[in-house]
Image (cartoon, grey):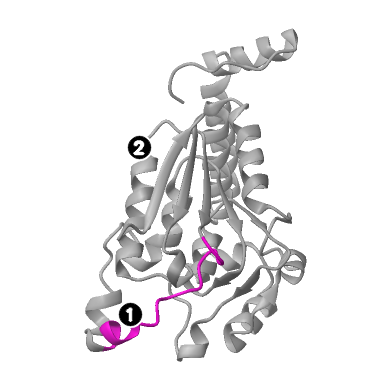
């Protein structure tokens, strides 16, 4: 059974979780499929990604049927090996989207729980339907968030919010999530809004967009002020006068849409 569908059109990769009958609950096969999709897109010439889920929910969390398999496994062997650089396979479900070199926009609806919430945190931008519910669900099962949440949440919200969500496993609505910085905006049709935003991004210089994502990632990594300032200068020097920048300028002056050629 397919777990993930990837469709590329107009430089936008639509990545869709396709396990609608299980509310896109994450099992080992889906984890592998999500990571494989992200890694493949790292090597492509796309310019934006829209991440969404079919059916009634974005992703309702870990597939409960997987718990028995996990319980029977050696926990050290299951989660401790670093299979993808500095992550294990489950952490890479979220972190791979930070490695994808272009903006990733998550369209959220229904349940965005546990594994699904951490997957969404890996996106650059999160657009939520008003009825979406988000939760750090692991404490419900006597566990801690272990799919990148602790690496990503501190960059988005306050410590007391992280603690409240983690200690209680309490779902929160999209409005509260917006106030806490967990989602970027709310839209009645988040998938359409995500595609509109992706199309807007595609209209910008692909080289500059990739450079901007690299810079933001470095700035958020705890790098020194000097390293960040030097990276700003390096990225800018690599953009000035190059074909994508010159086309952006020409299009602005001519009042037309830019046509970018070649890879970023």
Q: Which residues are magenta?
A: 55-71
Q: Position of residue 113 (x, y in %)?
A: 54, 74
Label 2 sits on a secondary structure element that is loop
Give residue 164's quadrant in the image.
Answer: bottom right
User: What residue did someone put label 1 on?
Assistant: 66
**70 is within the stretch colored magenta:** yes
User: What residue did someone put label 2 on?
Assistant: 43
**199 is within the stretch colored magenta:** no
| Chain-order first, disc 2 or disc 1 | 2
Q: Residue furthest bottom?
A: 142
Residue at the image point whose x is 34% and y is 82% from the top: 65
- In the displayed structure, 45 sits above or below 240; it is below
Using the rendered image of the protein, determine whether residue 71 is visible from the camera's viewpoint: yes
Residue at the image point whose x is 38% and y is 41% from the top: 42
Residue 156 shown left or right of residue 24 in the figure: right
Q: How would you classify the magenta stretch by its main secondary structure?
A: loop
Q: Position of residue 1 (x, y in %)?
A: 30, 61
Q: Position of residue 172 (x, y in %)?
A: 69, 76
Label 1 sits on a secondary structure element that is helix
**For the residue carrying disc 2, how many other residues have a C-alpha within 10 Å: few (<14), some (14-19), or many (20+)?**
few
Residue 97 shown left or right of residue 246 in the figure: left
């Amino acid at each position: 059974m397919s777990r993930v569908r990837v469709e590329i059109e107009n430089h936008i990769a639509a990545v869709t979780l396709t396990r609608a009958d299980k509310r896109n609950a994450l099992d080992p096969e889906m984890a592998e499929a999500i990571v494989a999709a992200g890694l493949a897109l790292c090597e492509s010439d796309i310019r934006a990604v829209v991440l969404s889920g079919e059916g009634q929910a974005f992703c309702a969390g870990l597939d409960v049927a997987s718990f028995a398999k996990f319980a029977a496994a050696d926990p050290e062997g299951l989660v401790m090996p670093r299979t993808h650089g500095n992550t294990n396979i489950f952490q890479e479900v979220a972190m791979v989207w930070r490695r994808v070199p272009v903006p990733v926009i998550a369209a959220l609806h229904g349940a965005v729980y546990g594994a699904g919430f951490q997957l969404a945190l890996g996106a650059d931008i999160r657009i939520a339907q008003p009825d979406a519910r988000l939760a750090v669900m692991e404490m419900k099962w006597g566990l801690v968030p272990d799919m990148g949440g602790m690496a990503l949440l501190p960059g988005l919200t306050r410590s007391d919010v992280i603690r409240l969500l983690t200690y209680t496993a309490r779902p929160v609505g999209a409005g509260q999530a917006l106030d806490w910085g967990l989602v970027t905006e709310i839209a009645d049709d988040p998938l359409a809004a995500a595609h509109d935003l992706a199309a807007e991004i595609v209209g910008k210089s692909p080289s500059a967009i990739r450079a901007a994502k690299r810079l933001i990632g470095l700035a958020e990594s705890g790098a020194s002020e000097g390293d960040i300032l030097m990276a700003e200068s390096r990225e800018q020097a690599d953009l000035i006068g190059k074909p994508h920048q010159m086309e952006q300028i020409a299009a602005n002056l001519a009042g037309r849409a830019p046509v970018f050629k070649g890879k970023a």
